[in-house]
Image: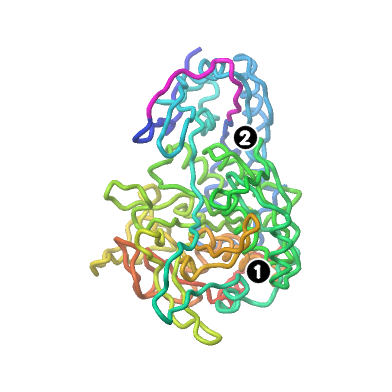
Amino acid sequence: MAKQPISGSDKQHLEGSKCIGQCNMAEKIEVIVMLRRKDEAGFRQMMAKIEAGDAPGAPVSREEFDKRFGASEEDVDKIKTFAKYYGLSVVRAEANTRSVVLKGTIEQFQKAFDVKLERFQHPNMGEYRGRSGSVSVPDDIHGAVTAVLGLDSRLQARPHFRFRPPFKPARGAAQTSFTPLDLARLYDFPESDGAGQCIAIVELGGGYQTSDLSTYFSTLGVKAPKVVSVGVDNGKNAPSGNSNGPDGEVTLDIEIAGAVAPGATLAVYFAPNSDAGFIDAVNRAIHDTTNKPSVVSISWGSPESNWAQQSIGAFNDVLQSAAALGVTVCAASGDSGSSDGVGDGADHVDFPASSPFVLGCGGTSLKASGQGIGREVVWNDGDQGGAGGGVSGAFDLPVWQKGLSVTSANGQTTVLARRGVPDVAGDASPQTGYEVLIDGEQTVVGGTSAVAPLWASLIARVNAINGAPSGFVNAKLYKAKGACNDITEGNNGSFAAAKGWDACTGLGSPNGAKVAAVLKSGANKKS
Protein backbone atom coordinates (compact mmCIF):
# COMPACT_ATOMS: atom_id res chain seq x y z
CA MET A 1 0.00 0.00 0.00
CA ALA A 2 1.63 3.26 -1.17
CA LYS A 3 1.94 5.94 1.54
CA GLN A 4 2.84 9.62 1.82
CA PRO A 5 4.17 11.56 4.82
CA ILE A 6 1.85 14.03 6.53
CA SER A 7 3.17 17.56 6.14
CA GLY A 8 4.74 18.90 9.33
CA SER A 9 4.66 15.56 11.16
CA ASP A 10 8.45 15.37 11.63
CA LYS A 11 9.29 15.22 15.31
CA GLN A 12 12.72 15.64 16.86
CA HIS A 13 13.70 14.35 20.27
CA LEU A 14 14.24 16.91 23.00
CA GLU A 15 17.81 17.84 23.86
CA GLY A 16 18.93 15.64 26.74
CA SER A 17 16.66 12.74 25.74
CA LYS A 18 18.21 9.29 25.69
CA CYS A 19 16.80 6.16 24.04
CA ILE A 20 16.54 3.42 26.66
CA GLY A 21 15.04 0.62 24.59
CA GLN A 22 12.20 -0.73 22.54
CA CYS A 23 8.54 -0.36 23.45
CA ASN A 24 6.45 -3.35 24.43
CA MET A 25 4.97 -4.24 21.03
CA ALA A 26 1.80 -5.62 22.68
CA GLU A 27 1.09 -2.45 24.70
CA LYS A 28 -2.21 -0.84 23.70
CA ILE A 29 -2.41 2.91 23.08
CA GLU A 30 -4.89 5.39 21.63
CA VAL A 31 -4.13 7.73 18.73
CA ILE A 32 -6.19 10.65 17.38
CA VAL A 33 -6.55 11.20 13.64
CA MET A 34 -7.63 14.77 12.77
CA LEU A 35 -9.55 15.35 9.53
CA ARG A 36 -10.12 18.22 7.08
CA ARG A 37 -13.28 20.35 6.99
CA LYS A 38 -16.07 19.86 4.47
CA ASP A 39 -16.13 23.50 3.34
CA GLU A 40 -12.62 24.76 3.90
CA ALA A 41 -13.00 27.66 1.44
CA GLY A 42 -16.19 28.88 3.12
CA PHE A 43 -14.55 28.58 6.53
CA ARG A 44 -11.53 30.64 5.43
CA GLN A 45 -13.80 33.41 4.13
CA MET A 46 -15.70 33.51 7.42
CA MET A 47 -12.50 33.48 9.49
CA ALA A 48 -11.02 36.39 7.55
CA LYS A 49 -14.02 38.50 8.59
CA ILE A 50 -13.91 37.30 12.20
CA GLU A 51 -10.18 37.93 12.54
CA ALA A 52 -10.59 41.44 11.14
CA GLY A 53 -13.48 42.12 13.53
CA ASP A 54 -15.93 42.50 10.64
CA ALA A 55 -18.13 39.46 11.25
CA PRO A 56 -21.79 40.53 11.34
CA GLY A 57 -24.44 39.16 13.72
CA ALA A 58 -24.35 36.06 15.86
CA PRO A 59 -21.61 33.44 15.69
CA VAL A 60 -22.26 30.12 13.98
CA SER A 61 -24.30 27.79 16.19
CA ARG A 62 -22.76 24.45 17.12
CA GLU A 63 -25.43 22.68 15.04
CA GLU A 64 -24.81 24.78 11.92
CA PHE A 65 -21.06 24.52 12.41
CA ASP A 66 -21.26 20.72 12.46
CA LYS A 67 -23.23 20.68 9.20
CA ARG A 68 -21.03 23.13 7.33
CA PHE A 69 -17.57 22.74 8.81
CA GLY A 70 -17.36 19.30 10.35
CA ALA A 71 -15.64 16.39 8.64
CA SER A 72 -17.49 14.55 5.90
CA GLU A 73 -18.93 11.13 6.69
CA GLU A 74 -16.99 9.90 3.66
CA ASP A 75 -13.68 10.90 5.25
CA VAL A 76 -14.70 9.37 8.59
CA ASP A 77 -15.58 6.12 6.81
CA LYS A 78 -12.22 6.11 5.04
CA ILE A 79 -10.43 6.18 8.41
CA LYS A 80 -12.65 3.37 9.69
CA THR A 81 -11.70 1.26 6.65
CA PHE A 82 -8.01 2.10 7.17
CA ALA A 83 -8.29 1.10 10.85
CA LYS A 84 -9.92 -2.21 10.01
CA TYR A 85 -7.18 -3.03 7.50
CA TYR A 86 -4.52 -2.69 10.24
CA GLY A 87 -6.56 -4.36 12.98
CA LEU A 88 -7.16 -1.12 14.89
CA SER A 89 -10.43 -0.50 16.74
CA VAL A 90 -12.37 2.78 16.56
CA VAL A 91 -12.94 4.22 20.04
CA ARG A 92 -14.69 7.38 18.87
CA ALA A 93 -15.50 8.86 15.47
CA GLU A 94 -16.92 12.39 15.44
CA ALA A 95 -17.60 14.45 12.35
CA ASN A 96 -18.22 17.59 14.47
CA THR A 97 -14.79 17.60 16.19
CA ARG A 98 -13.22 16.17 13.01
CA SER A 99 -11.48 13.51 15.07
CA VAL A 100 -11.31 9.71 15.04
CA VAL A 101 -9.73 7.95 18.03
CA LEU A 102 -8.09 4.62 17.21
CA LYS A 103 -6.90 1.94 19.63
CA GLY A 104 -4.44 -0.86 19.04
CA THR A 105 -1.03 -2.25 19.88
CA ILE A 106 2.21 -0.39 19.33
CA GLU A 107 3.12 -2.99 16.71
CA GLN A 108 -0.12 -2.28 14.81
CA PHE A 109 0.39 1.49 14.91
CA GLN A 110 4.00 1.18 13.73
CA LYS A 111 2.80 -0.68 10.65
CA ALA A 112 -0.22 1.57 10.07
CA PHE A 113 1.74 4.84 10.11
CA ASP A 114 5.26 3.66 9.14
CA VAL A 115 6.83 4.89 12.38
CA LYS A 116 9.28 3.48 14.91
CA LEU A 117 8.28 3.95 18.54
CA GLU A 118 10.90 3.66 21.30
CA ARG A 119 11.25 4.43 24.99
CA PHE A 120 13.15 7.56 25.95
CA GLN A 121 14.37 9.11 29.18
CA HIS A 122 14.58 12.87 29.76
CA PRO A 123 16.03 14.48 32.94
CA ASN A 124 12.97 16.73 33.40
CA MET A 125 10.19 14.67 31.83
CA GLY A 126 11.09 11.17 32.94
CA GLU A 127 10.32 8.23 30.66
CA TYR A 128 8.14 8.62 27.59
CA ARG A 129 7.26 6.91 24.32
CA GLY A 130 8.81 8.76 21.41
CA ARG A 131 9.18 8.62 17.66
CA SER A 132 11.47 10.10 15.02
CA GLY A 133 10.71 11.17 11.49
CA SER A 134 7.41 11.62 9.69
CA VAL A 135 4.03 9.94 10.05
CA SER A 136 2.85 8.42 6.76
CA VAL A 137 -0.64 7.43 5.61
CA PRO A 138 -1.99 5.66 2.51
CA ASP A 139 -2.58 7.71 -0.64
CA ASP A 140 -6.37 7.35 -0.48
CA ILE A 141 -6.64 9.11 2.93
CA HIS A 142 -3.67 11.46 2.65
CA GLY A 143 -5.75 14.43 1.56
CA ALA A 144 -8.27 13.88 4.34
CA VAL A 145 -5.84 13.63 7.29
CA THR A 146 -4.47 16.86 8.78
CA ALA A 147 -2.67 15.38 11.81
CA VAL A 148 -2.01 12.13 13.68
CA LEU A 149 -1.57 12.76 17.39
CA GLY A 150 -0.66 10.54 20.34
CA LEU A 151 1.89 8.16 18.85
CA ASP A 152 4.36 9.71 21.27
CA SER A 153 3.58 10.38 24.93
CA ARG A 154 6.07 13.05 25.98
CA LEU A 155 4.79 15.76 28.31
CA GLN A 156 3.74 18.65 26.08
CA ALA A 157 2.98 21.52 28.45
CA ARG A 158 3.69 22.91 31.88
CA PRO A 159 1.43 24.82 34.25
CA HIS A 160 2.18 28.54 34.53
CA PHE A 161 1.88 29.21 38.24
CA ARG A 162 4.43 30.17 40.90
CA PHE A 163 4.18 29.97 44.66
CA ARG A 164 5.40 32.95 46.62
CA PRO A 165 8.92 32.07 47.80
CA PRO A 166 9.60 32.51 51.52
CA PHE A 167 11.79 35.51 52.19
CA LYS A 168 12.44 38.02 54.97
CA PRO A 169 10.99 41.41 54.10
CA ALA A 170 12.96 44.55 54.92
CA ARG A 171 12.09 46.21 58.21
CA GLY A 172 8.68 47.82 57.96
CA ALA A 173 7.97 46.28 54.53
CA ALA A 174 4.86 44.16 54.15
CA GLN A 175 4.09 41.56 51.55
CA THR A 176 0.97 42.17 49.51
CA SER A 177 -1.64 39.66 48.45
CA PHE A 178 -5.15 39.86 47.06
CA THR A 179 -8.26 37.75 46.87
CA PRO A 180 -9.72 37.43 43.36
CA LEU A 181 -12.56 39.70 44.56
CA ASP A 182 -10.01 42.38 45.55
CA LEU A 183 -8.59 42.30 42.03
CA ALA A 184 -12.04 42.35 40.41
CA ARG A 185 -12.70 45.54 42.39
CA LEU A 186 -9.30 47.12 41.64
CA TYR A 187 -9.76 46.34 37.95
CA ASP A 188 -13.32 47.74 38.03
CA PHE A 189 -15.07 44.60 36.81
CA PRO A 190 -18.76 45.21 35.98
CA GLU A 191 -21.31 43.94 38.50
CA SER A 192 -22.38 40.40 37.57
CA ASP A 193 -21.97 36.88 38.87
CA GLY A 194 -21.72 35.32 35.40
CA ALA A 195 -25.06 33.53 35.75
CA GLY A 196 -26.06 31.45 32.74
CA GLN A 197 -22.49 31.17 31.46
CA CYS A 198 -20.07 28.25 31.41
CA ILE A 199 -16.30 28.71 31.75
CA ALA A 200 -14.29 25.77 30.39
CA ILE A 201 -11.06 25.18 32.32
CA VAL A 202 -8.50 22.92 30.65
CA GLU A 203 -6.22 20.84 32.90
CA LEU A 204 -3.47 18.34 32.04
CA GLY A 205 -3.10 16.51 35.33
CA GLY A 206 -3.83 16.77 39.04
CA GLY A 207 -7.20 17.58 40.47
CA TYR A 208 -9.24 19.47 43.03
CA GLN A 209 -10.69 18.54 46.40
CA THR A 210 -14.29 19.58 46.95
CA SER A 211 -13.48 20.34 50.60
CA ASP A 212 -10.91 22.96 49.50
CA LEU A 213 -13.45 24.67 47.26
CA SER A 214 -16.21 24.65 49.90
CA THR A 215 -13.91 26.14 52.54
CA TYR A 216 -12.41 28.70 50.17
CA PHE A 217 -15.67 30.11 48.81
CA SER A 218 -17.26 30.05 52.26
CA THR A 219 -14.33 32.06 53.69
CA LEU A 220 -14.69 34.59 50.85
CA GLY A 221 -18.42 34.84 51.50
CA VAL A 222 -19.16 33.75 47.92
CA LYS A 223 -21.73 31.17 46.87
CA ALA A 224 -19.82 28.13 45.64
CA PRO A 225 -20.11 27.77 41.85
CA LYS A 226 -21.25 24.58 40.16
CA VAL A 227 -18.10 22.65 39.21
CA VAL A 228 -18.38 19.83 36.66
CA SER A 229 -15.51 17.43 35.98
CA VAL A 230 -15.25 16.21 32.35
CA GLY A 231 -12.87 13.38 31.48
CA VAL A 232 -11.10 13.49 28.11
CA ASP A 233 -9.05 10.58 26.70
CA ASN A 234 -9.09 8.72 30.03
CA GLY A 235 -8.17 11.84 32.01
CA LYS A 236 -9.99 12.50 35.29
CA ASN A 237 -10.05 14.62 38.44
CA ALA A 238 -7.20 12.99 40.36
CA PRO A 239 -5.82 15.17 43.16
CA SER A 240 -2.41 13.92 44.29
CA GLY A 241 -2.33 15.82 47.58
CA ASN A 242 0.83 17.60 46.41
CA SER A 243 0.06 21.31 46.14
CA ASN A 244 3.38 21.92 44.34
CA GLY A 245 2.24 19.78 41.41
CA PRO A 246 -0.70 20.11 39.00
CA ASP A 247 -3.15 20.22 41.96
CA GLY A 248 -1.98 23.78 42.50
CA GLU A 249 -2.90 24.75 38.93
CA VAL A 250 -6.28 23.05 38.92
CA THR A 251 -7.37 24.47 42.25
CA LEU A 252 -6.24 28.05 41.69
CA ASP A 253 -7.93 28.13 38.26
CA ILE A 254 -11.24 27.05 39.78
CA GLU A 255 -10.93 29.34 42.82
CA ILE A 256 -10.10 32.45 40.79
CA ALA A 257 -12.77 31.91 38.11
CA GLY A 258 -15.34 30.76 40.68
CA ALA A 259 -14.77 33.68 43.04
CA VAL A 260 -15.22 36.26 40.27
CA ALA A 261 -18.07 34.49 38.43
CA PRO A 262 -19.78 32.28 41.05
CA GLY A 263 -23.00 32.15 39.05
CA ALA A 264 -21.26 30.47 36.11
CA THR A 265 -20.82 26.73 35.69
CA LEU A 266 -17.15 25.74 35.71
CA ALA A 267 -16.57 22.74 33.44
CA VAL A 268 -13.09 21.33 34.11
CA TYR A 269 -11.74 19.20 31.25
CA PHE A 270 -9.09 16.75 32.44
CA ALA A 271 -6.83 15.27 29.75
CA PRO A 272 -3.40 13.60 29.56
CA ASN A 273 -0.44 15.96 29.29
CA SER A 274 0.46 15.25 25.66
CA ASP A 275 -0.12 17.15 22.43
CA ALA A 276 -3.02 14.78 21.67
CA GLY A 277 -4.61 15.22 25.11
CA PHE A 278 -4.19 19.02 25.16
CA ILE A 279 -5.65 19.53 21.68
CA ASP A 280 -8.50 17.08 22.25
CA ALA A 281 -9.46 18.72 25.56
CA VAL A 282 -9.91 22.14 23.94
CA ASN A 283 -11.64 20.60 20.92
CA ARG A 284 -14.13 18.72 23.08
CA ALA A 285 -14.75 21.77 25.28
CA ILE A 286 -15.70 24.08 22.42
CA HIS A 287 -17.98 21.44 20.86
CA ASP A 288 -19.56 20.43 24.20
CA THR A 289 -23.32 20.63 23.61
CA THR A 290 -24.09 19.76 27.26
CA ASN A 291 -22.13 22.49 29.09
CA LYS A 292 -21.84 24.93 26.13
CA PRO A 293 -18.87 27.03 27.32
CA SER A 294 -18.75 30.64 26.13
CA VAL A 295 -15.16 31.12 27.31
CA VAL A 296 -12.15 28.81 27.78
CA SER A 297 -9.33 29.32 30.30
CA ILE A 298 -5.95 27.69 29.59
CA SER A 299 -3.11 28.00 32.10
CA TRP A 300 -0.77 25.47 30.45
CA GLY A 301 1.63 25.84 27.55
CA SER A 302 5.19 25.45 26.32
CA PRO A 303 7.57 27.22 23.93
CA GLU A 304 6.57 27.15 20.27
CA SER A 305 9.86 25.34 19.57
CA ASN A 306 8.64 22.35 21.64
CA TRP A 307 5.73 21.69 19.27
CA ALA A 308 5.74 19.66 16.07
CA GLN A 309 4.43 21.65 13.11
CA GLN A 310 1.41 19.33 12.62
CA SER A 311 0.50 19.68 16.32
CA ILE A 312 0.68 23.48 16.35
CA GLY A 313 -1.34 23.49 13.11
CA ALA A 314 -3.99 21.11 14.46
CA PHE A 315 -4.30 23.10 17.70
CA ASN A 316 -4.55 26.43 15.88
CA ASP A 317 -7.24 24.90 13.68
CA VAL A 318 -9.27 24.04 16.80
CA LEU A 319 -8.76 27.59 18.13
CA GLN A 320 -10.11 29.00 14.87
CA SER A 321 -13.18 26.81 15.33
CA ALA A 322 -13.59 28.36 18.79
CA ALA A 323 -13.58 31.85 17.26
CA ALA A 324 -16.18 30.78 14.67
CA LEU A 325 -18.38 29.34 17.43
CA GLY A 326 -18.20 32.58 19.44
CA VAL A 327 -16.08 31.03 22.22
CA THR A 328 -13.39 33.30 23.71
CA VAL A 329 -10.12 31.50 24.57
CA CYS A 330 -7.80 33.00 27.22
CA ALA A 331 -4.30 31.50 27.64
CA ALA A 332 -1.36 32.25 29.94
CA SER A 333 1.72 33.67 28.19
CA GLY A 334 4.29 31.94 30.42
CA ASP A 335 6.30 32.64 33.56
CA SER A 336 9.90 32.59 32.34
CA GLY A 337 10.27 36.01 30.74
CA SER A 338 11.34 36.56 27.15
CA SER A 339 13.26 33.25 26.95
CA ASP A 340 10.20 31.19 27.94
CA GLY A 341 12.69 29.01 29.82
CA VAL A 342 14.30 27.52 26.71
CA GLY A 343 17.87 28.33 27.74
CA ASP A 344 19.41 28.68 24.26
CA GLY A 345 20.06 32.41 24.60
CA ALA A 346 17.27 33.28 22.14
CA ASP A 347 13.81 34.72 22.69
CA HIS A 348 10.76 32.43 22.61
CA VAL A 349 7.02 32.78 23.11
CA ASP A 350 4.60 30.29 24.62
CA PHE A 351 1.97 28.35 22.70
CA PRO A 352 -1.09 28.26 22.68
CA ALA A 353 -0.95 31.88 23.94
CA SER A 354 0.83 32.84 20.70
CA SER A 355 -2.05 31.72 18.50
CA PRO A 356 -3.72 34.72 16.83
CA PHE A 357 -7.07 33.19 17.87
CA VAL A 358 -6.24 33.30 21.58
CA LEU A 359 -6.32 36.20 24.03
CA GLY A 360 -2.74 35.90 25.32
CA CYS A 361 -2.57 36.85 29.02
CA GLY A 362 0.68 38.36 30.35
CA GLY A 363 1.72 39.43 33.83
CA THR A 364 2.16 42.50 36.01
CA SER A 365 3.15 43.33 39.57
CA LEU A 366 0.46 45.42 41.25
CA LYS A 367 0.33 47.61 44.34
CA ALA A 368 -2.92 49.05 45.62
CA SER A 369 -3.35 52.55 47.01
CA GLY A 370 -6.52 53.12 48.96
CA GLN A 371 -9.39 51.87 46.81
CA GLY A 372 -7.44 51.96 43.57
CA ILE A 373 -4.25 50.86 41.82
CA GLY A 374 -1.19 52.67 43.15
CA ARG A 375 1.41 51.30 40.75
CA GLU A 376 1.47 48.52 38.18
CA VAL A 377 4.60 47.40 36.34
CA VAL A 378 5.79 44.41 34.28
CA TRP A 379 6.13 41.29 36.41
CA ASN A 380 9.84 40.49 36.61
CA ASP A 381 11.12 38.77 39.74
CA GLY A 382 14.39 37.73 38.10
CA ASP A 383 15.16 34.06 38.72
CA GLN A 384 11.81 33.70 40.49
CA GLY A 385 9.90 34.28 37.25
CA GLY A 386 8.60 36.97 34.95
CA ALA A 387 5.99 37.74 32.31
CA GLY A 388 6.24 35.72 29.11
CA GLY A 389 6.05 37.73 25.90
CA GLY A 390 7.76 38.51 22.64
CA VAL A 391 7.35 37.86 18.92
CA SER A 392 6.09 34.57 17.50
CA GLY A 393 8.22 32.42 15.26
CA ALA A 394 5.19 30.40 14.12
CA PHE A 395 2.48 32.94 13.25
CA ASP A 396 2.21 35.85 10.83
CA LEU A 397 1.20 39.33 11.92
CA PRO A 398 -2.57 39.52 12.55
CA VAL A 399 -4.41 42.37 10.85
CA TRP A 400 -5.29 43.94 14.22
CA GLN A 401 -1.60 44.21 15.22
CA LYS A 402 -0.50 45.95 12.02
CA GLY A 403 1.38 49.20 12.64
CA LEU A 404 2.45 48.31 16.19
CA SER A 405 6.03 48.48 17.42
CA VAL A 406 8.05 46.31 19.77
CA THR A 407 10.45 47.94 22.24
CA SER A 408 13.56 46.10 23.40
CA ALA A 409 14.96 46.41 26.93
CA ASN A 410 17.75 48.66 25.60
CA GLY A 411 15.18 51.11 24.25
CA GLN A 412 15.33 50.23 20.56
CA THR A 413 12.00 50.24 18.75
CA THR A 414 11.22 48.14 15.68
CA VAL A 415 8.05 47.56 13.70
CA LEU A 416 6.25 44.41 14.79
CA ALA A 417 6.63 41.95 11.90
CA ARG A 418 4.95 38.80 13.26
CA ARG A 419 2.33 37.92 15.89
CA GLY A 420 3.16 39.79 19.10
CA VAL A 421 2.49 38.24 22.52
CA PRO A 422 0.69 38.87 24.88
CA ASP A 423 -2.53 40.76 24.15
CA VAL A 424 -3.47 41.77 27.70
CA ALA A 425 -2.17 41.32 31.25
CA GLY A 426 -3.07 41.24 34.92
CA ASP A 427 -1.51 40.79 38.35
CA ALA A 428 0.85 37.79 38.22
CA SER A 429 3.79 38.35 40.57
CA PRO A 430 3.75 35.97 43.55
CA GLN A 431 4.96 38.96 45.61
CA THR A 432 1.59 40.63 44.91
CA GLY A 433 -0.24 37.38 44.35
CA TYR A 434 -3.56 35.63 44.85
CA GLU A 435 -4.76 34.15 48.13
CA VAL A 436 -5.89 30.57 47.49
CA LEU A 437 -6.48 27.31 49.37
CA ILE A 438 -4.76 24.24 47.89
CA ASP A 439 -4.77 20.75 49.41
CA GLY A 440 -5.93 22.20 52.73
CA GLU A 441 -3.24 24.89 52.89
CA GLN A 442 -3.72 28.65 52.64
CA THR A 443 -1.08 30.00 50.30
CA VAL A 444 -0.27 32.84 47.90
CA VAL A 445 0.37 32.13 44.22
CA GLY A 446 1.15 34.09 41.11
CA GLY A 447 2.02 33.37 37.52
CA THR A 448 0.26 34.15 34.27
CA SER A 449 -1.86 31.05 34.93
CA ALA A 450 -3.78 33.21 37.40
CA VAL A 451 -4.36 35.88 34.74
CA ALA A 452 -6.09 33.54 32.25
CA PRO A 453 -8.97 32.60 34.63
CA LEU A 454 -9.18 36.22 35.81
CA TRP A 455 -9.78 37.43 32.24
CA ALA A 456 -12.03 34.43 31.51
CA SER A 457 -14.25 35.32 34.48
CA LEU A 458 -14.38 38.97 33.34
CA ILE A 459 -15.54 37.77 29.90
CA ALA A 460 -18.14 35.53 31.59
CA ARG A 461 -19.48 38.53 33.52
CA VAL A 462 -19.69 40.58 30.32
CA ASN A 463 -21.40 37.72 28.46
CA ALA A 464 -23.98 37.41 31.25
CA ILE A 465 -24.68 41.16 31.14
CA ASN A 466 -24.99 41.18 27.34
CA GLY A 467 -26.95 37.95 27.16
CA ALA A 468 -24.66 37.01 24.27
CA PRO A 469 -21.12 35.66 23.81
CA SER A 470 -18.29 38.13 23.29
CA GLY A 471 -16.66 35.67 20.90
CA PHE A 472 -13.32 36.57 19.34
CA VAL A 473 -12.35 39.68 21.32
CA ASN A 474 -8.83 40.49 20.10
CA ALA A 475 -9.80 42.67 17.14
CA LYS A 476 -12.35 44.56 19.27
CA LEU A 477 -9.88 45.31 22.08
CA TYR A 478 -7.10 46.44 19.72
CA LYS A 479 -9.46 48.70 17.76
CA ALA A 480 -10.96 50.25 20.90
CA LYS A 481 -7.79 51.69 22.46
CA GLY A 482 -8.00 52.63 26.13
CA ALA A 483 -9.97 49.64 27.41
CA CYS A 484 -6.90 48.53 29.37
CA ASN A 485 -4.63 50.17 31.94
CA ASP A 486 -1.48 50.89 29.95
CA ILE A 487 1.66 49.52 31.64
CA THR A 488 4.74 51.58 30.81
CA GLU A 489 7.36 50.45 33.37
CA GLY A 490 9.58 47.39 33.51
CA ASN A 491 10.83 44.62 31.22
CA ASN A 492 10.62 40.84 30.91
CA GLY A 493 14.24 40.36 29.87
CA SER A 494 14.63 41.27 26.20
CA PHE A 495 11.50 43.42 25.89
CA ALA A 496 10.37 46.55 27.69
CA ALA A 497 7.03 48.09 28.55
CA ALA A 498 6.10 51.09 26.43
CA LYS A 499 3.17 53.34 25.72
CA GLY A 500 0.44 51.37 24.00
CA TRP A 501 0.95 47.69 23.17
CA ASP A 502 4.19 46.04 24.28
CA ALA A 503 5.66 42.53 24.32
CA CYS A 504 5.45 42.22 28.12
CA THR A 505 1.91 43.26 29.04
CA GLY A 506 0.18 43.65 25.68
CA LEU A 507 -2.48 46.36 25.79
CA GLY A 508 -2.33 46.32 29.60
CA SER A 509 -4.36 45.15 32.57
CA PRO A 510 -8.17 45.25 32.43
CA ASN A 511 -10.32 48.27 33.10
CA GLY A 512 -13.36 46.05 33.46
CA ALA A 513 -16.00 48.72 32.86
CA LYS A 514 -14.29 49.88 29.66
CA VAL A 515 -13.73 46.30 28.45
CA ALA A 516 -17.44 45.63 29.05
CA ALA A 517 -18.40 48.75 27.09
CA VAL A 518 -16.20 47.73 24.14
CA LEU A 519 -17.58 44.19 24.09
CA LYS A 520 -21.15 45.39 24.49
CA SER A 521 -20.86 47.61 21.43
CA GLY A 522 -19.56 44.65 19.45
CA ALA A 523 -21.70 41.99 21.14
CA ASN A 524 -22.62 38.97 19.06
CA LYS A 525 -26.39 39.27 19.50
CA LYS A 526 -28.32 36.11 18.76
CA SER A 527 -30.63 36.42 15.81
- Residues tagged 2 and 1 counted as in contact (Cβ below 8 A): no
* Quadrant hosting residue 69: top right
Which colour assignment does the render follow?
rainbow
Cα separation, mark 2 vs mark 1, equals: 34 Å
Image coords of residue 241 (percent x, y): 63, 48
Image coords of residue 107 (percent x, y): 54, 15
Q: Which residue carries the number 2 mark?
A: 99
Tell me the chief SS of the magenta region. strand
Residue 435 visible (yes or no): yes
Say how many tags the image has: 2
State left or right for residue 203 relative to residue 226. left
Nearer to us in this view, 262 or 400: 262
Nearer to us in this view, 35 or 303: 303
Vertical placement of residue 325 versus 4, above or below: below
* Quadrant hosting residue 197: bottom right
Going by the numbered disc 2, the residue's amino acid type is Ser
Is 27 within the magenta?
yes
User: Which residue is drawn at the image coordinates 61% and 28% (left, top)?
Assistant: 30
Q: Which residue occupies the extreme top position in the image?
A: 1
The residue segment tinted magenta is 18-31
Q: Which residue carries the number 1 mark?
A: 260
- Which-is-in-front pick, marks 2 and 1? 1
Vertical placement of residue 131 versus 185, above or below: above
Can you say which quadrant of the picture contains the C terminus? bottom right
Question: Helix, strand or loop at disc 1?
Answer: helix
Is 184 within the magenta?
no
Vertical placement of residue 399 versus 236, above or below: below
User: Which residue is drawn at the image coordinates 45% and 49% (left, top)?
Assistant: 351
Q: Earlier in the sequence, mark 2 or mark 1?
A: 2
Residue 527 visible (yes or no): no
